[in-house]
Image (cartoon, grey):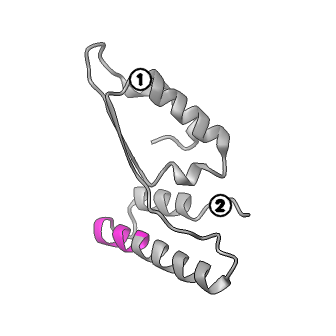
Amino acid sequence: MVSDMLDLEEDIFELDVEEKVALYAHYILKSMIATPNWLDHSIRVFRNINSCVMVMIETEANHNSPIFANNFIEALFFYGAYFDCLEDYMRHDDQHRMNTESISLERKPRT
């Protein structure tokens, strides 16, 4: 893990020349929308390691409705499912869980 996505570099992966790479991005790209330099840098690193396939998992949710109640309900279901998943697979004191939660609760772009 890196503390800042701008610290992500190709040499961290220690890949062999003949090695095949698959990237798995689980809910991470959405959190980078608020910091476009992170997203651009990460995509550049992903391209440079010549991955064969990339799997992205992002949840579709509309948090931009002009009606507050609709926004609230969408956000409630989205974050409820997200944190239920963390609850099922990680202990409360797990450092990876704490990092994931802090990334999930970062400031998001607003319209």
Q: Mark 1 — residue?
A: 49
The image quarter in which residue 7 lies: top right
Extreme residue toward the bottom, this view: 69
Give the residues drawn in magenta, as a range.
82-90
Q: SS of the residue at dot 2?
A: loop
- In the rendered image, residue 1, in percent from the top left (x then y), is placed at 44, 42
Spatial distance from mark 1 to mark 2, Cα to Cα?
29 Å
Q: Is 58 situated above or below 13?
A: below
Residue at (33, 68) in percent of width and height: 91
Q: Mark 2 — residue?
A: 108
Q: Magenta part mainly helix, strand or loop?
A: helix
Q: Is 18 situated above or below 111?
A: above
Image position of 14 (left or right of 28): left
Amino acid at pointer 2: Lys
Magenta includes 49? no
The crowding category of the residue bearing disc 2, from other C-alpha atoms within 10 Å (few below 14, some 14 to 19, many at least 20), is few
The crowding category of the residue bearing disc 1, from other C-alpha atoms within 10 Å (few below 14, some 14 to 19, many at least 20), is some
Mark 1 or 2, nearer chain start: 1
Extreme residue toward the right, this view: 111
Could you say which is closer to the camera, residue 106 or residue 59? 59
Residue at (41, 56) in percent of width and height: 96
